[in-house]
Image (cartoon, coloured by chain):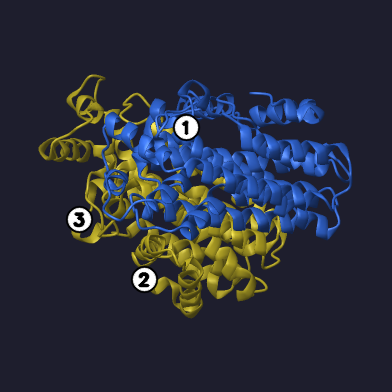
Chain colours: A yellow, B blue
Amino acid sequence: MKQLWLFNQINSDLQRVEKELTKFVETDYPILQDSGIHLLTAGGKRLRPAFTLLAGKFYAYSLDKLIPVAMALELIHMATLVHDDVVDASLTRRSRPTVKANWGNIVSVETGDYLLAKALILISQINHPEVSRILAEVSVEMCQGEIQQIKASFDVEQNLKQYYFRIKRKTALLISACCKLGALVSEAPRHQVWALGAYGHSLGMAFQIVDDVLDITAKPSEFGKPIGGDLRQGIMTLPMILALQSFPSGSPLHELLRKADKTDAEVAETIELIKGTGAIDQSMRIVDAYINKAKKHLQDLPKVSSRKALEDLAEFIAIRKF
Amino acid sequence: MKQLWLFNQINSDLQRVEKELTKFVETDYPILQDSGIHLLTAGGKRLRPAFTLLAGKFYAYSLDKLIPVAMALELIHMATLVHDDVVDASLTRRSRPTVKANWGNIVSVETGDYLLAKALILISQINHPEVSRILAEVSVEMCQGEIQQIKASFDVEQNLKQYYFRIKRKTALLISACCKLGALVSEAPRHQVWALGAYGHSLGMAFQIVDDVLDITAKPSEFGKPIGGDLRQGIMTLPMILALQSFPSGSPLHELLRKADKTDAEVAETIELIKGTGAIDQSMRIVDAYINKAKKHLQDLPKVSSRKALEDLAEFIAIRKF
């Protein structure tokens, strides 16, 4: 697991989440065990559990209550990743082959279902009606976002509203839930649960836009997956939609973005065209706006150390390279 | 929806389940709406909701409590079907093209996830810790069964224990849960919840064995899916495992069952070899044993009309042709 310095104050607790997760997904079924552990050890930043713990830090911080919630959130996240890889036909993620690449669609579908079922076990143990309801609602919305993404792929006519609609469901709602639920099970006052949810929402939007920008601008060695993945899959991201606005319809950029099987040279050409329009800077200005919004939502919260961590995290999102 | 005459006493209630299900899976997302409705209208016998309602009939029958449970169970069942179709690469089910055949793997994965997420919404509304726990545990076991099936495919060395292990997870546990939960939310005494669960378990085992026999013996026009599907997918079923015992290892039957891409002629030859061993009759005797066991579990239950229906249902399982 990559340790972010931003998580210093919860490092040992995050490690406990990690240990419990590993133990919890253990199974006697060799394929499932291998694919599950492969996913877990592929790491990721454990951003979601971190948000839950940091949100809990404001109030009656109880690891016993927070850990199952953090685990359920990470399991839902992992399950959607492994299912999205079937959907997106992705072969690498976080610099490693995906479950799909190693074991194929079949095992990917089952691994995702298994992780979701394990999340369900945790949810039933947590036994908190509002936690269950929020996780259920987020799960439904996430599917709708994914379906929308499939439907809108290679559609160069789509607008910004559709894009925001999609990334809200793809990323922001779950991160928002992480913050909200961390506060909720720590007995935070109602309006602060809401504020933390709003923080997570804005931060999640920023996070996804940065991800979409990095797909065009990152160094492959730092990014952990091939550059131009969205371009190849026909996922229209903010920089693409903004760049398209600089050209009349039917332009070379329109044609390239619409094209299903792009050659490497075409991907490179598309990237150059997008960069040339200033759409990257424009996108990063929108990121900044979301970051500022996120930080504003923190202002009404108690001035404890995790507030500083969440502020720093928001700053970090905008400058991250991976 | 095919109406079974056995469900006469709950027909109007089953129709309400059907109506509520259709309303509940409705979404503004065209692809999801189409694939969801396609699955729903493909029908099936709605066996699982029927078990839940019939189990509830013994006690404090409350449709308001039973319907969400019945719906959640049917949604979980439908989700596993649509995901299994990705896994099995099935192109027809119940005489109609599968979601996978019409929309591909991507939409199948998302449709299944969507149905599961909707089930989660119901579970959170039902807000009954034991219902949540049982459904979560069954979901985990079902994934493990499916994984086991993948692992054991084309393996002619597997034994009966492995087969029973698998069909328990594939079918029996969910049917058992249907009966158990119907009783549970209707305030049945503890030991009767258990008895209904045991009934459902035995009946589910019988049901799956009959399904496996029909895959070899059925008339395609009655069966709703192509004959020999298990043979082609390398799923080793009871009649196959029993038939293999009549031959030394390395026999033509061993070779045929081990072969991945069978021609139509090879499938036909395999079916004839299996039929020739008496494995079909042997399998049906095992079905009868399960049916008798199922009926025995009913004996301690109140003598109400639904007890007769569950007995008849058990009888019907053994003679069904579809």
Counting residues from the start of the chain, the first of labels 2 and 3 encountered is 2
Residue A220 tag number? 3
Residue wearing tag 1: B217
Residue at the spot 53% in from the left edge and 45% down from the top edge: B283
- Of all chains, the one bearing label 1 is B
Q: Residues within 10 Å of mark 2 (few under 14, many from 20)?
A: few
Residue at the spot 26% in from the left edge and 60% down from the top edge: A96
Residue A133 horizontal side relative to residue B256, left or right: right
Nearer to us: label 1 or label 2: 1
Residue B44 horizontal side relative to residue A148, left or right: right
Amino acid type, label 1: Thr
Q: Quadrant of the C terminus of chain A?
A: bottom left
Q: Residues within 10 Å of mark 3 (few under 14, many from 20)?
A: some
Q: Inspect this view and state whether residue A76 appears.
A: no
Amino acid type, label 3: Pro
Q: Which of A197/A134 is in front?
A: A134
- Of all chains, the one bearing label 2 is A
Residue B56 tag number? none
